[in-house]
Amino acid sequence: MNPAPSRPLLVVDDDRKLCGLIRDYLAPHGWQVDMRHTGPEGLEAARTGKHEAVLLDVMMPGMDGFEVLRELRKSSSIPVLMLTAMGEEADRIVGLELGADDYLPKTFSSRELLARLRAVTRRSAITESEAPAKDLTCGDLVLNQDTHVASVRGEALELTALEFAILACLLKAKGRVKTREALLEEVSERRFDVFDRSIDVHVSQLRRKLGDDPKQPRFIRTIRGVGYKLEDGSVPE
């Protein structure tokens, strides 16, 4: 039996020892790790489109991970996992607001890294063997599951893979409340923690891209203390 082809991963971190440990752990699981140790080098490599995902450290000299992510999101929706200092909630929130798909504390276990990596790449994968799927619609919002393109009034939205997954979940449950727990488990395969604000941040980003007013939403309504519900897309009176 021929071995499965290696899946290219870009790791951007100035900690060369950690990069080597990540490479050594992921190699037997089918990942080919490409390492860069400065922000500018990492950004250049990420823009080539040769990788399935990016593991990006926040704290780097010269050009930090936030700057790299901000520039990368101008032209790419590649899945990005941010590495943050343990307990630094501010770093996690900033990363998510800039378009990171998920985050890991620097004290991550190797098994957790592999699970998160598989989850973010699975969300962004579109295989030719998948059967064509019907469009999901809500007013003038259209989400095409086959092409992974969402648009409002015919104008395509620039969504990350995770934002697309959240929007698809809400569209499939249109008119019904989706709890934060359900959304987090469905789109990131992560167990819900009451202090985890990642879903709220992603929904806030979605609203901005949809042009939605959280006080008078056309699309995503907050159900206080519970979660979110997709409205019918009509313009509030």
Image (cartoon, rainbow, N blue to C red):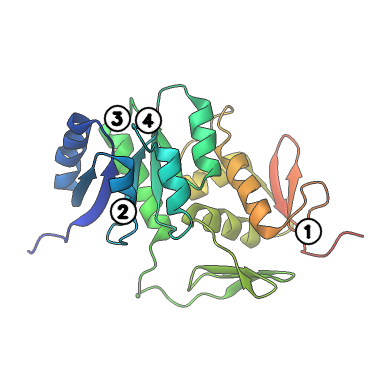
**Which sits in the foreground, 56 or 2?**
56
3D distance between C-alphas at marks 4 and 2: 18 Å
Q: Earlier in the sequence, mark 1 or mark 4?
A: 4
What residue did someone put label 4 on? 59
Left or right placement of residue 187 versus residue 17 in this view: right
Identity of the residue drawn at 50% across and 49% down = 187
**Is residue 57 visible to the viewer in this orientation of the structure?**
yes
Mark toward the viewer: 3 or 4: 4
Q: Residues within 10 Å of mark 2 (few under 14, many from 20)?
A: few
Residue at the limit of the structure toward the front, as seen here: 62
Sequence order check: which comes first, mark 3 or mark 4? Answer: 4
Badge 4 crowding class, 10 Å Cα cut-off, few under 14, some 14 to 19, many 20 or more, is: some
- Disc on the earlier residue, 3 or 2: 2
Note whether residue 173 is visible: no
Tell me if label 1 and label 3 are in contact, CB under 8 Å: no
Image quarter of the N terminus: bottom left
Which residue is identified by label 2?
A: 44
Question: From the viewer's perspective, is the residue at label 3 or at label 2 nearer?
Answer: 2
Identify residue for label 3: 109
Q: Are marks 3 and 2 in contact (CB under 8 Å)?
A: no
- Count the numbered circles shown: 4
Which residue corresponds to mark 1? 218
Contact between labelled residues 4 and 3, with CB atoms less than 8 Å apart: no
Secondary structure of the residue carrying tag 1 is loop
